[in-house]
Structures are given as structure tokens and as C-alpha cells.
Image (cartoon, rainbow, N blue to C red):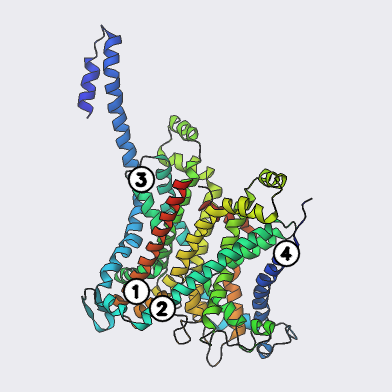
Amino acid sequence: MRRRPLIADVAVLALLVLYVVPFFWQLLTSFKPEAELLRVPPLFPSRLTLEHYGVVFAQSAMPRALLNSLGVGALATLAACALGVPAAYAMATLRVPAAGALMLGIVASTAFPQIATVSPLYLVMRGLGLRDTWAALVLADASFALPFVIWLMTRFMREVPRELAEAAALDGAGRWRTLVTIYVPLTAPGLASVALLTFLSAWNEFLFAFTFTATEASRTVPVALALFPGVFEVPWGDIAAASILASVPPVLIVVLLQRWLVRGLLAGALTE
Amino acid sequence: MGGPDMALHTLQPSSRPGEAGALLDPNARSSKYAARLLEERRAAIAFVAPAVLTLAALTAGPALWVFWLSLRQRVPVFGIDRFAGFAHYAFLATDARFWSAFRVTAIFTVTSVALELLLGLGVALALRGQRAGRRSALGLLLLAWALPGVVTARLFEWLYHPAAGLVNVALGVRFNWLGDPALALLALILADVWRTMPFVALFCYARLLTIPHVVYEAAAVDGATRLATFRFVTLPLLVPVLLVTLLFRTLDALRAFDLMFVLTGGGPAGMTETLTVYAYRSLFQTLRLGFGSAIGVIVFALVMLVAAAYLTVLRRQESRA
């Protein structure tokens, strides 16, 4: 067996500490009694309490924000896939006019800084009367993710054997039926990865959500967390509890669906 | 188009099928082929159009419109909306706050990307040799990357707390990390490295897994030292991945907004105010849409400059290979 270098073991151990401790500390803070928050050491509290979660659920904008984020994230994912999958199908299998230039533009648009497009988009949303609505965020998040969806799905669909599509055509299937019955099922794992990444980017998105929302009616989780109110002092325990709640979907996605997430992430850069 | 086609078919003489067929067939096939091409073209446009129109309206359109906005004096609260030419850019050229934000953006980008690439590469190499705990380590890294930037900002705000922050407790000091002008940018960079190093580590690690074992056996047979193996075998194979992550990370660092906006708000005394934070404050806090857009355009130009430089380097690499 190959000798394992000690330095690598130490590095991995240090890594685990540097990543476990901050997560654990935030979790512990969310269960610490208010009076013990600013007294460190001791590191561990005398008792654990749910009071911070009580405050977050009863007196903050978080419950509504969680609902908004779930709704906006799901709708934006749906919209981005509904628009992106047919486009990817055409790019992968049909002769699209100016396909090369189109794909170049799509890939280039992923580099556009949000801070540059936010002011025109703000005027668009205001013009359409969409300020402070889910619709504004769904449109912004879906169009932000759309280039990734098209780019990745085109790659996945190029790998589907042509013969299958031709066989379907011989059976009299039209293009839509070929897309729905052949291409979508065969690229389902890739589509799942793409949908996960889209949802995650919508869940985490801050700049657009901060700019296009004005009240609790449409504020998403990151916005509510950034604006978390403190009257006289910063409510560290409540903020920790709100942070934990904001982390639940990303944690679930990473823990349960790690494989799909990694596949989607790596597909973008590694398979050249 | 059906006209000539039909005519050819009816003209096809039955007396000399062989010769006439040979003459007429390619014509008939090519016009049928053209019709099919046309149909395919129409179908392709129908499939692509909704996505392309959406992107045109909500991404490409705004990307062009922001240039126009940056040439206007536009302050909605006072009903001001007039052409200003390059006045905003002229002002920015001598604006101390702009140059400070430019400097902060440059330091933040260069330092955090350099640290992320070095540490990410190191972590990937260290993880490769591990048997136990590799999956959970990857899960933890992925989690740090997958959390909302605002959550990371809140997490570090608490870790950096002067009295009760774990960082001070662990180091046995009482620094005011986020309030001290000398420390705030460093604190911000460390938080960003914590959050985005996993991205680099994951990419490098995935590439390492695809290097076949025989390559290393060959190096061992040749008596290569550990360092030589890394320098002449592993590193060259990692260069493409490192270049891609370098591009992604540089663009993201230039565009970063949420972490600094929530963690330090650009303070103390503007020590962590990046171009994006300055642009946001101008746009939506002092409500000067034209002026803020001009800063946004400059971020845009920087991003495109980096992307163009990267493509040039990549092309040179490819032509050398």
C-alpha cells in the first residue's frame, strides 16, 4: 500500500475543523439562552432553548419569506426549464440559424454582472407594475439561470443517440413528442442537476431580490435575513435561528442529492 | 414550390425510366431536401424563440440599456431625466471614492482568488490520499459553497464579534475585525475564501480522480520524487481545470456583492467598499440611476476585459499544444 503522507492527514483534519466549527457554532448559538450569548467562555451553554426559533416564527418576517422563497424558487426553476429545455433540444438536434453565434451570446451572457443589469431591470419591473411581486423575482431569477440551463442541457442532449430519435420519427412521432418521450427521459439525471442548481441560485439570490421587493409580501429569505431587525441590540440568537432556517433547503440538497449537484456543477467545466 | 416539382414528376417519361430517373432524381431529392430544411429551420426557430426572446428582453436588452442609462442624468425622485453625455465618467475619473472602490475591488479579487486557488488545490491533493471521511469532507465543502451569501455573511459577523466571537476566543485576542479599518478587508477576504475555496477544491479533486493510476506508476518506475511527480505529472494535467476555475472565480470576485454588502456594508470608512457596493448605493440609496449605472458599466467592462484576456491566454495555450 502507498504510504500516506502525514501532512495530508493534518490538512484534512484542519479543513474539517474549519468547516464544521462555524456551522456547529451557528447551530449552537440558535439554541443558546439570550443571557449567555455574549459570555464566552464557557463555550457550551447551561441549557438549550427554543426561544429564538419562537421569536423568528412569531415575530419576524421569516415565515413569510420562507414561503416566498419556496414559491419563487420553484416557479423560477419551472420557467427556466420550460424555456431552456426546448431551446437546448433545438440547439442539440436541429439546424438552428446562426447557432454558433447564438450559443456564444448565451454563454457570454452568463458573465454579465448583475450590478450592471439591475438598474434597467428595475425600470422594466417598475414599468410593468411588477415591483414587490413574485413575478418580478421569477422573471429575474429564471432569465438569470436560463443560459446555464440551455448550455448544460444542450450538452446532455447531444449525447443522446441519434438513432433513437430517428426511430421515433419513423414511428410518426413529431418533434415535440420526440422531445418529451425520448430526450427528456434520457437526460432526466442531467435535468435534475440543472433544476437543483437553478433552484439553489434562486434561493440564494440577493441583489435582484433586495432591489425589486419592498415589503414582506415578496421579500425572500436572504433579504429578510439581511434586514433582520434589531431594536436596541443585535439579536444574535434570533439571527442564528433565522440563518439555520435559511440553510435548510441548501443543506437538504447537499445531503440528499450531493451526487446530482456535483454532476451538474462539474458538467459545466470538466467535460470539454 | 410544389409547381415545378409536380411538373417534373408528370414529365417523367415511362419509355426511358433509367436515364430520366438518373437525370431527374437528384433534382427531386434536392427540392424535397430543401423543403425539409425549411421545415426544420422553422421548427428550430419555434423551439428556440421563447428562450431567446426572454434573454433578449431580460438580459441582453438591459445589458445594452445600461450603457444608455449611464449617459443620462436620471434621478426619479426629483423627476430629472436628461442626457448627460460622458459627464458621469468624467466625474468618476477624478472621484476619490471611485478610485478607493476600484482599489478595494482589485485587492479583494486578486487576494481572494489567489488564496482560493492555492488552498483549493492543496485541499484537493490532501483529500485524494484519504480513505475515510472523504465523502463527508466533500459534503461539508459543498455545503459552504451552497449556502446563501447572506447566511455566510451573518455567520462570519457572529464569528468576528469583538467580545463573543469564536475567532477572537480561538486566537486569544480582542480584535474588532469588522470595525477596524486595518482588518476589515482581510476579514472580508477570509470569509470569501471560506465560502468559495470549496468550488476550486471540488473541481481540482474531480480532475485528480480522472488521472489514471498507471501514470503515477510510470513516474514511480522512473524514480521520480514526490515533488517531481507533482511538478511534471499532476500539475500539467490540472492546468486546464485551474484555468477554468481561475476565470470563474475572477469573474465572481469582481461581481461579488452580497457578502460585503451584508457583512461590512462597505465600512468601516469605505475600507471594504467595492465597485459593486458603490454602484448599489448610488443606484438605490442616493437614487442616482444614471450615475450608478456608469459604475455598473465599468464593472461590466472589467468583467469583459478579464474574459477576453483569459480567452487570449487559452488560445495561445491551445496553439502551443
Name which residue type carries label 2.
Answer: Ala
Q: Is residue A214 visible?
A: no
Q: Residue B90 location in percent, x, y?
A: 26, 77
Q: Is residue A71 left or right of residue B59?
A: right
Mark 2 to mark 1: distance in Å?
A: 10 Å
Question: In the rendered structure, the residue with mark 4 lies on which chain?
Answer: A
Work out whether mark 2 precedes mark 1 in sequence or the reverse, and give the earlier one.
Answer: 2
Mark 3 to mark 2: distance in Å?
A: 39 Å
Question: In the rendered structure, the residue with mark 1 lies on which chain?
Answer: B
Q: Nearer the viewer, mark 3 or mark 2?
A: 2
Q: Which residue is mark 2?
A: B101
Q: Residue B71 location in percent, x, y?
A: 24, 72
Q: How dense is the environment of label 4, judged by Cα within 10 Å: few (below 14), some, or many (20 and up)?
A: few
Q: Residue B318 location in percent, x, y?
A: 46, 48
Q: Nearer the viewer, mark 2 or mark 1?
A: 2
Q: Which residue is mark 3?
A: A99
Q: Nearer the viewer, mark 3 or mark 4?
A: 4
Mark 3 to mark 4: distance in Å?
A: 50 Å
**In the displayed image of the protein, which residue is found farthest to the right?**
A1
Q: Residue B76 location in percent, x, y?
A: 27, 79
